[in-house]
Amino acid sequence: MRAIPRQKTRPAIFSYCSDPAILEGFQWLSCYLTTGKHMGFYLSFGTVLLLLAITAPLALAFGFFGASAARSRIAPLAIFGKGYIAIVRGVPDIAFFLFFVIALDQGIEWLRHKVKCSDWDEPIRQGNDFVVCQIAKMPLNDSPQWVHEAYGFSLAVLTFAIVFGAFAANVLFGAMRAVPRAQIETAEAYGMSPRQSFWRVLVPQMWVYALPGLSNLWMVLIKATPLLFLLGVEDIVYWARELGGSKTERFTDFPHGDWRMWYFLALLIFYLAFTKVSELVLARISRRLSKGQATLAGEAQRKEPGTAAEATT
Amino acid sequence: MKSLLLGSAALALSATFALADTVRLGTEGAYPPYNFINDAGEVDGFERELGDELCKRAELTCEWVTNDWDSIIPNLLSGNYDAIIAGMSITDERKEVVAFTEGYTQPSPSAYAALSEGVDVTSSVVAAQAGTIQAAHVAESGATLVEFPTPDETIAAVNSGETDVVMADKDFLAPIVESSDLVFLGDVYLGGGIGMAFRQSDDEMRGKFNAAIASMKEDGSLNDMLEKWEIEGQF
C-alpha cells in the first residue's frame, strides 16, 4: 500500500517537459525518466537496499540464537531451536508471507484491542471480518500514510528475518559442529568453562565454515525482495512491471508499447552488479576469516610469502 | 522500529477521541480508465474522481492506497483499508464475503479482443486476469483459460501470441484496441455493475457511501463523470 500525495501537479525537473508530445529523442527520454512515477521506481531501489541492510544482520541474529538454542543442553530450549529451524524451513515462503504477516498484524491488533477497549462487547471475528475498535488499529486509520508504510516495512523486515533466520540457523548449527573437536578439547584442557570455550574458541572459528552457506542465503535474500509486494511494499519488480506495461495516450503524456523487456533488463543489470559487489565483499571476508584457521585456505595463506608474518601477529 | 512503535503508541494515546473520520480506500491502480497510476505516480481515473467526490459528499476524509488485486479482498477483511473501489463487479460469489454499495456503473459489457478477426472464442486460448468475472466466464465457456495477475499482462500475452484472445471489461480494452492492432470480437454482459465493497460488519459506512452515490445519480454528476471517462451506460 502506497501513499498517494494530495497535490495534483508536480513541477517537472526540466522546463521543456511541459508538453512531451512535441519532444523527441533525448529530450523526450529525459522527461520520461523524470516523471513522478519514475521517481517512485528509483526510490524503491532505496527501499530494497534498506530492507537488505536491516534484514541481513537481523536474520543473522535470529540464526545465531536459533543455532545456539538448537545445540543447547536444556531440552525445551533445544526443542524450540530445532522446531524453529524445521518448521520455518519447511513452510513455503509465499504461504509464510501471506499467512504469517496477516496473523502477526491481527495478533498485534488483538492485543491492543484487549488492553484499550476492554468494554467492547461485539465479537472480534464477525463472519469473515476481523473487527477491532478504532483506537486498537495498528497503525491508526487516521495516521499519516508514511506510518502505514513504515509499519508494513517493519512487518516485512521481521518476516524476512524470521524466514531467513531459520536457514541461517541451520547453516550456523552445521558450522558449529564443523569446528574440529580438538580445538574444543584444547580449550577444555586449558580449564575453560563450556561458556568460555563456546565464546572464545567455537564462535570465532565457526564463521569460516558458515560463510559459504551464509553467502548463498545472502544471494537468495537479494532476489527474494519481490515478495515485498505481497506485504504492500512496492519494490523494484512491481515498478518495472507497472512502468513497462504498454500505455495508451489517453492516460499518460508518454504513451509507449510494451517496454517491460527494457525495464527488466535494467533490473537484470542491477542484480548482476549487486551480485558482483557481494561476491567481492564476501571473498574479502572469507580471506579475513581464514587467517590463522586450521583449514586448507588458512594453511595456504600461512605458506604465502609475505603474509606469514602478518598471520602470526 | 522501536521509535516507530513508540511514535504510533504516542499517536494512539493522543488521538483517542477524534477518530473514525478517515476512510482508507483500496484500489489496484492498474485498470484504466477506472483506476491507474498517472505520470506523477498518483492514483488517477474515473474511480479516483468518483471516490473523492463521494467522500466530499459523505463528509469523510479519504486516503487512497494501492494493493495487489489478488489480495485485495483479504486485506479489506483484515482491516488494512475500509473499502475497495477498484472496478470490482458486483457478483453473488463476492457478496458472500463482502458487502457492496449500489452500482456506480451500469452492468458493463466485457469484450473479447484478438489480433485478427474470426477467432472462435469458445475453443481458443483466452487470457484473463485472475479472480475476475471474465476469468470465470472464460472457464465456463469451454475455451482454454490462461490467467494473469495484472490486466497489463493479459494484453501482453495476446500481443506476443501466448494466447489467441484476451477478455476484459470493454471500457478497459477500448483505448487499447484503438491504439494497437487488436480488434474486438464480441461483447458479453457480465456481473451487476461495479460497486464499492465494504466489510459486511461495516453497514454504517456503507450506508453513507450509498447515500452519496444515490445523490450523485440524482443530480446527474455521476453521468457526467461516466461520460468524461468514456464508460458505457448512464443512469
Image (cartoon, grey):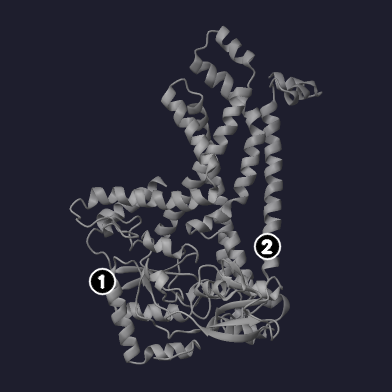
Residue A32 in percent (x, y) is at 63, 74
**Amino acid on which disc 2 is placed:** Phe
Q: Is residue B57 above or below residue A108?
A: below
Question: Is residue A35 shown to the viewer in this render?
Answer: no
Left or right side of B96 for A159: right
Please state which of residues B132 and B43 is positioned toward the viewer in this rendering.
B132
Height in image: B81 above or below B57? above
Q: Which residue is mark 1?
A: B204
- C-alpha span from label 2 to label 1: 45 Å
Residue at coordinates 66% horizontally, 77% vertically from top-left? A256
At 65% from the left and 33% from the top, the residue drawn is: A211
Place of residue B161 in the rendered image (x, y in percent of width and height, measured from the top left): 71, 73
Q: Amino acid at mark 1?
A: Glu
Question: Which is nearer the eye, B150 or A218?
Answer: B150
Q: Which residue is the extreme one toward the right?
A: A305
Q: Which residue is mark 2?
A: A264
* SS for callout 1: helix
Chain of the residue that carries numbered disc 1 in the rendered image:
B
Label drawn at residue A73: none
Residue B54 vertical position relative to residue A218 in the rendered view, above or below = below
Q: Residues within 10 Å of mark 1 (few under 14, many from 20)?
A: few
Which residue is at the front of the view, B219 or B117? Answer: B117
The part of the image, by quadrant, that contains residue A219 is: top right
**Other residues around mark 2 within 10 Å, as few (<14) / some (14–19) / many (≥20):** some
Q: Quadrant of the C terminus of chain A?
A: top right
Image marks 2 and 1: residues in contact by CB distance under 8 Å = no
Q: Chain of mark 2?
A: A
Residue B54 in the image: state x and y as whole percent: 34, 80
